[in-house]
Image: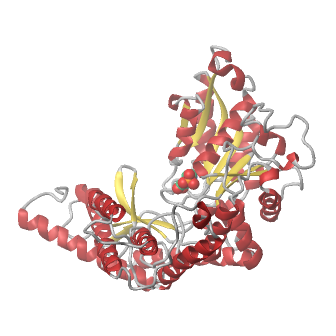
């Protein structure tokens, strides 16, 4: 049943249950704890049903105009239906659940956000009602203390001297990358903050060096902080999409010779496209020799820190000046929860060099010493750390490590399976839970392979049983799976392969019947 049909059914059952009457004109009623309990109960019941649904499903992709009209109808109580508030609430929750990518289903194999640990969701509700902006200790005493605790917990796997490093939470990996690159710029060019580009000597052109395969937020950051995309040095990658170590010195030398002052090198652990890990240890050595800030974008892969099996992939991370970890990816909490680490605590204050007497204290006291507003971009900020810490505290490190190990294992098994399938080709051996591959049946022209993958991916999404993604590697599209659900088995993946073959052969058949190219859509 589609999300829209489901809504219709839900609305047809209007009035079956006794309505809870409130006087909406009374603030007292709207804010009443009884109403809160009632509404929360409705939501929890719906979410429990949602979590209990073990069926294989991906996404019910709806024409936006139809969805828009459905929502308008719901708002205007169309067709003379008198819908109670309670039924409206149920209908909205249903619609929200059913129009989402089904992250809790084994059919979800497509993106980097997770089917969340349910307790983290429960705690999100607590945070919403307590509602404390967490950049200031006085408004968020517990989150401020917990940030320090969580930083120390994770530092067990990094190994920095106690009290000398810093961890800041930000709303997302993109913002964390921007913040770290800004700190690196201000560290190297301290006058940039107050004087801007005008303060630079004419011959000095600040530049950053990034992997060819870095996330777009990195080059976006360069644009935002006034470096300019033209001053981004692209470091070549090998077939595994890791930065080629043997080319780095040469590329940096050439950049310097052309008048660029490279102040930051951005490496990645767990690239978005293929999940590749750059050689941090060696890049740290090069950066140290050249006095360049090493920033590691570990939005996806830095969570491997908690896994004894996989931590070695992050060898050298303790030498980075800063690194990012998105807990809303591989630590399985709801978006957003990003952790930005700095090796040197003092440098975490470089990014934003401001005074604001209404919030920032020149001489911190025992309370304001815990404020983070001078280190992060946000003023009002969700208490991002709480969901993660509550799960960490109640379930321990092993929950996260076990899930990561399992996801990496299933990705390896799937890879091994694909090697035995004559009509599929893999693009790499997976380092983490991301795998890119192509379906290449007999009768398909090599020139059409990329468009063919795209068509398959779009049909799979439309059919709604599975949700996978696509990626362009070296100019050609490939299918991409990201395993975030620990309930996915090889059997589920085999069902996906059956779907891909069915759709692929159907597309080929249609093409040969119409004598058209496969690229015709
Ligand atoms: C490697 C990498 N860096 C940064 C980001 C951006 O993170 P966010 O979506 O939390 O802003 C992503 C997102 O997928 C990513 O994969």
Does the rendering let one see residue 308? no
In the image, 456 versus 278, the foreground residue is 456
- Could you tell me which residue is drawn at 81 percent across and 33 percent down? 357
Measured as percent of width and height from the top left, residue 447 is found at 24, 55
**Position of residue 53 in the picture relative to residue 291 (left or right):** left
- Could you tell me which residue is drawn at 18 percent across and 72 percent down? 506
In the image, 85 versus 267, the foreground residue is 85
In the image, 412 versus 43, the foreground residue is 43
In the image, 420 versus 119, the foreground residue is 119
**Position of residue 210 in the picture relative to residue 18 (left or right):** right
Does the rendering let one see residue 51? yes
- Could you tell me which residue is drawn at 64 percent across and 37 percent down? 249
Measured as percent of width and height from the top left, residue 61 is found at 32, 66
Q: Is residue 473 above or below residue 200?
A: below
**Position of residue 1 in the picture relative to residue 226 (left or right):** left
Measured as percent of width and height from the top left, residue 291 is found at 75, 35
């Amino acid at each position: 049943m589609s999300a829209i049909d489901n809504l219709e059914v839900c609305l047809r059952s209007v009035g079956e249950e006794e309505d809870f009457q409130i006087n909406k004109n009374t603030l007292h009623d709207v804010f009443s704890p009884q109403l809160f309990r009632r509404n929360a109960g409705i939501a929890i019941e719906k979410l429990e049903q949602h979590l209990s649904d073990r069926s294989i499903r991906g996404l019910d992709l709806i024409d936006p105009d139809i969805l828009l009209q459905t929502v308008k109808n719901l708002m205007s109580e169309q067709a003379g239906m008198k819908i109670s508030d309670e039924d409206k609430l149920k209908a909205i929750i249903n619609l929200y659940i059913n129009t989402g990518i089904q992250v809790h289903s084994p059919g979800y194999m497509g993106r980097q956000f997770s089917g969340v640990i349910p307790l983290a969701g429960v705690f999100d509700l607590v945070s919403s009602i307590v509602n404390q902006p967490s950049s200031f200790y006085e408004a968020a005493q517990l989150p401020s203390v917990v940030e320090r605790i969580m930083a120390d917990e994770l530092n067990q796997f990094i190994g920095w001297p106690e009290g000398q490093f810093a961890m800041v939470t930000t709303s997302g990996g993109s913002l964390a990358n921007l913040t770290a690159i800004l700190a690196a710029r201000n560290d190297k060019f301290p006058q940039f903050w107050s004087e801007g580009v005008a303060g630079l000597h004419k011959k000095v052109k600040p530049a950053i060096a990034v992997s060819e395969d870095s996330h777009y937020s990195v080059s976006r950051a360069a644009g935002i902080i006034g470096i300019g995309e033209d001053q981004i040095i692209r470091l070549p990658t090998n077939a595994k999409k890791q930065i080629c170590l043997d080319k780095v010195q040469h590329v940096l030398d050439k950049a310097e010779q052309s008048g660029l002052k490279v102040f930051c090198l951005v490496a990645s652990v767990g690239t978005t496209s293929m999940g590749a890990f750059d050689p941090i240890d060696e890049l740290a050595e090069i950066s140290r020799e050249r006095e360049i800030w090493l920033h590691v974008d570990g939005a996806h892969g830095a969570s491997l820190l908690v896994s004894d099996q996989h931590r070695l992939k992050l060898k050298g991370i303790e030498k980075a000046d800063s690194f990012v970890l998105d807990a809303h990816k591989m630590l399985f909490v709801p978006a957003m929860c990003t952790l930005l680490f700095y090796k040197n605590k003092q440098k975490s204050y470089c990014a934003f060099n401001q005074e604001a007497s209404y919030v920032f204290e020149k001489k911190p006291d025992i309370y304001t010493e815990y404020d983070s507003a001078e280190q992060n971009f946000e003023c009002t900020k969700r208490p991002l750390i709480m969901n993660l810490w509550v799960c960490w505290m109640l379930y321990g490190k092993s929950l996260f490590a076990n899930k990561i190990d399992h996801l990496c294992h299933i990705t390896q098994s799937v890879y091994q399976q694909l090697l035995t399938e004559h009509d599929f080709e893999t693009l790499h051996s997976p380092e983490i839970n991301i795998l890119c591959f192509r379906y290449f049946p007999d009768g398909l022209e090599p020139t059409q392979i990329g468009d063919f993958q795209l068509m398959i991916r779009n049909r799979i999404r439309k059919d709604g049983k599975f949700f996978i993604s696509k990626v362009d590697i070296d100019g050609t599209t490939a299918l991409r799976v990201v395993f975030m659900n620990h309930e996915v088995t090889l059997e589920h993946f085999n069902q996906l392969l059956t779907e891909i073959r069915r759709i692929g052969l159907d597309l080929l058949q249609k093409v040969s019947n119409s004598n058209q190219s496969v690229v015709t859509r």
